[in-house]
Amino acid sequence: MAVVCPECDNPITVDEDEVEEGETLQCDECGIDLEVVSVDPLELAAVEEAGYDDEDSMHLAGEDDE
Ligand SMILES: [Zn+2]
């Protein structure tokens, strides 16, 4: 099935059996990273955070062991 890139309206073909919620895809047309926010129905959202590759740092952000 195809979903439309929220950034450039390019149709992106996604095999819904091959993706999982939380997975990140990339638009071939504009190169933006798209997170799979839902698989039924299939829905993508643009990922615009810099340094997204380190999820652990995000997790630690709210903790304070003082
Ligand atoms: Zn795009």
Image (cartoon, rainbow, N blue to C red):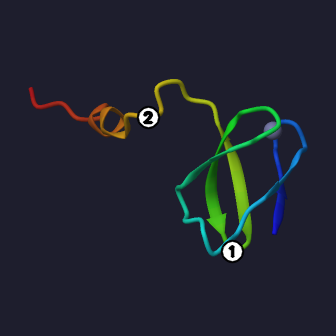
Percent x, y of residue 1 = 81, 69
> What's the residue at 90%, 43% (across, down)?
9
Secondary element at tag 1: loop
Q: Residue furthest left?
A: 66
Q: How dense is the environment of label 2, judged by Cα within 10 Å: few (below 14), some, or many (20 and up)?
A: few
Q: Determine which of the numbered discs, if any, sits on residue 53 in the image.
A: 2
Q: Determine which of the numbered discs, if any, sits on residue 21 in the image.
A: none
Q: Are marks 2 and 1 in contact (CB under 8 Å)?
A: no
Quadrant containing the C terminus is: top left
Instruction: Describe residue 23's horizontal placement relative to residue 42 as left or right.
Output: left
> What's the residue at 79%, 32% (across, down)?
30
Percent x, y of residue 28 = 77, 40
Percent x, y of residue 20 = 55, 65
Between 29 and 53, the one lying in front of the other is 29
> What's the residue at 63%, 75% (across, down)?
17
Placement of 48 over or under 18, stated as above or below:
above
Q: Determine which of the numbered discs, if any, sits on residue 40 in the image.
A: 1
Between 57 and 5, the one lying in front of the other is 5
Placement of 60 over or under 50, stated as above or below:
below
Q: Amino acid at mark 1?
A: Asp
Q: Earlier in the sequence, mark 2 or mark 1?
A: 1
Percent x, y of residue 6 = 82, 43
Q: Is mark 2 within 8 Å of ligand 1?
A: no
Secondary element at tag 2: loop
The quadrant where residue 13 appears: bottom right
> What's the residue at 83%, 62% (across, down)?
2
Instruction: Describe residue 56's horizontal placement relative to residue 2 as left or right.
Output: left
Q: CA distance from mark 2 to mark 1?
A: 25 Å
Q: Amino acid at mark 2?
A: Asp
